Amino acid sequence: MMTHLEATPDHAGGLGVSIRGGVVMKQVLRPDNGNRWSLLGRWGTPSQQRVEYQKVGFSPSGHLLVTLEHRGDERLRWWHWQEGRRESLAGEVVVPKGVAMQALPALGGIAVTNTRFELGLYAESCGALLRQAKLPDHEAWGLVASADGTRLAMHDQGSGVLLWDTGTWTALGRLAGPQQEVVGLAFSPDGQWLAAACLRGRVVLWNASTGQLAHVHAEEEEQFVNVAFDPSGEQLVATTTGPRIQRFHVGDWSLGGTLSGPVPGSRHAAFSPDGGLLAVTKFGFLVLGVDEGARVFRYEVDNDFYGSNAVFSPDGTTVAWGEPDGTVGLWGIASAS
C-alpha cells in the first residue's frame, strides 16, 4: 500500500518525519532547519557521455519531476514525483541538441526547445512528439511558461524575447524594448508580468498579456544573469555576474535591497513555495533565507564546465538539482530510521 506524503512543520525530537495514523508526513524546508538537510537519493541512471548542463523542473501541480540533458546522452526524462520512488520513471526520450523544457499538464506534454530552431511538445503518456514548429530565426536558449500554461516565452541572446501561444502552437511575436543579450526570463505567478535579465546591464519588464514594455532598470556597469518572482508576486530578484542579488518591489519596480550569492555569477534563482527560501546556483547550489539573507544550505560541485538549476518541489519538502553525471540529486530532511 502506497503511503500519502504531506508537508508538515517540524516536530519535537528532531525526527525527519512524523507518523500520524500510519501516514508519513514529510517536513517542509525552512531557514531554521538547514542543518538537517541531506542527500535523500539520486534518481535516474548516469549518462554515458559528458553532460554540459541539466535543466530540472517540477510540473505546476507537482505530479512530475522532469529533467533535460544538454549534450551527454541528450535525454528528456520524467518521473511520477508523488509516488516518491526512483522506479517511478514515467518516460524517457532522446532530444538531440535539446536546451530547455517546461511541463505543460493542460496539453498533456512537455515543451522542449533545441538548437535547431524548433519547439516540440512530447507526450507525457508515451513520449511521442505531439507538436513541432520552427521558430522564426530564433535559437531559443531559455524557455519559461506562464502558470496557466497558455503562454511560453523564450530568449535568444541575439534575437531577444519571443512569446508563444500554446493553444495554437504559434508565435505571438517578439517583444519591444531593450533586449541586448537576454540570458534569463520569468513570468510572475499571476501571469501579469514577464521579466528579463540582460548581460548589458538591464532588467526589463513587460505586461505579459499585451506585450507592452512596462519598466527598464538600467545599470551600465552591471551584468544581470537571471530573474525570479517570489510566490506572492510582490518581489522580483535578479542575479548578477557578481555575488550581488538585487531585489525589486513589483508594481513600482523600486529597489528592495540586496542578497549575497555564493560566488560571483549565480546562474539560476528559484524561490521555495512559501517564499522563505531562495536557491541560486554556481558550482553547486546555495539556499538563502530571504528575510535575513543568511546561508541556510550549501552543496558544492567542483566542476567549472557543468551547470544545473536547483528547484523546490511544490510541497516545499525537497530541492532537486541535476548532478554532473546525469542523475538528479534530491535534498531534504531524511526520515527517521
Image (cartoon, rainbow, N blue to C red):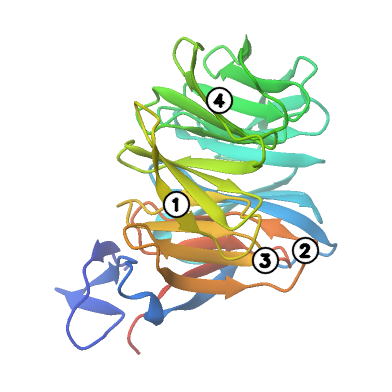
Residue 154: x percent and y percent? 64, 28
Q: Earlier in the sequence, mark 1 or mark 4?
A: 4
Q: Residues within 10 Å of mark 1 (few under 14, many from 20)?
A: some
Give me the C-alpha separation between circle 2 and circle 3. 19 Å
Look at 46% across and 56% down and name the residue there.
Answer: 259
Would residue 189 be found to the left or right of residue 198 on screen?
Answer: left
Q: Residue 161: which numbered mark, if any? A: none
Q: Residue 152: which numbered mark, if any? A: 4
Q: In terms of image quadrants, where is residue 20?
A: bottom left
Asked if labels 2 and 1 touch by Cβ distance under 8 angstroms, the answer is no
From the image, which quarter does the C terminus lie in? bottom left
Q: Earlier in the sequence, mark 1 or mark 2?
A: 2
User: Which label sits in the foreground, 3 or 4?
Assistant: 3
Residue designated by label 1: 258
Q: Earlier in the sequence, mark 2 or mark 3?
A: 2
Residue closest to the eye, 98 or 287: 287
Q: Secondary structure at mark 3?
A: loop
Give me the C-alpha separation between circle 2 and circle 4. 29 Å
Residue designated by label 2: 47
Asked if labels 4 and 1 touch by Cβ distance under 8 angstroms, the answer is no
Residue 127: x percent and y percent? 64, 39
Residue designated by label 3: 283
